[in-house]
Amino acid sequence: MSIAQPVVVVIGDVVGSRRAVDRAVLHAVVVDALEQVNRRWDGDLRITVGDEYQGTLPSLGAALTATVWLRLSLLPDHDVRHGIGRGTRTALDPAAGIEDGPAWWAARAAIDEARARAGRAATRAARTSYRVADGVDEPVAAVEAALLARDELVGRLDERSLSVLGGLMSGRTQRELADELDVSASAVSQRVRHDAIGVVQTMTTWLEELA
């Protein structure tokens, strides 16, 4: 049964998961992160096989924000890549929740592109890509440019700055993060400015407004 209303689909996988010392622990960490994303952004992301997960989110903005939040939840120990697609879908087995269709094909093409970009020196920090199905009229290039820039900025952060960005995106204040990290508030503020954490925050806020 074809579902005519376009949806936003996310396909993700863990980068280099086979090198994980304890894959069971990694699996549990990913499951917990997905559950948090589903509660926060009303998604239905779920692990499908091995280190891959997929599902839908209610808007492009939700998908763009949820995917970077997932990265921050796993970094620096593990990293993930994502393909985001928009289009229609077909319910192959509604009872089992098995779907197919243009939205899924677009997301698969997107994650393949993210993987290919990471294999090139100039774009090796790329972890996210966006594609739309035929007939969907959207400024894909603008979203792709923002994602490439955001991935580059996040990829440059050290462990402490990743903690700061993740904390801010989870709603904590700089003062609260300073107390948690046992550093001064000015040290956190300096990281926000010097490591472009504020830029990533602002980019994500703007991107989350996309329908």
Image: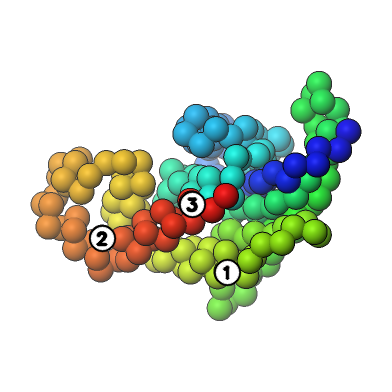
Mark 2: which secondary structure? helix
Mark count = 3
Residue 186 in the image: x percent, y percent?
A: 12, 57
Is 101 left, or right, of 180 in this rendering? right
Residue 146 in the image: x percent, y percent?
A: 51, 66
Sequence-wise, which precedes: disc 1 or disc 2? Answer: 1
Sequence-wise, which precedes: disc 3 or disc 2? Answer: 2
Whole-angstrom CA distance, mark 1 to mark 2, is 25 Å
Is 122 left, or right, of 165 in this rendering? right
Residue hosting label 1: 142
Q: What amino acid is at disc 3?
A: Glu
Q: Nearer the viewer, residue 83 or 102?
A: 102
Please tell me whether mark 3 or mark 2 is closer to you in this view.
Answer: 3
Which residue is painted at 11% across and 52% down in the image? 184
| The quadrant where residue 191 appears | bottom left
Q: Which mark is residue 168?
A: none
Which residue is painted at 88% across and 33% down in the image? 1
Q: Which mark is residue 209?
A: 3
Q: Which mark is residue 192?
A: 2
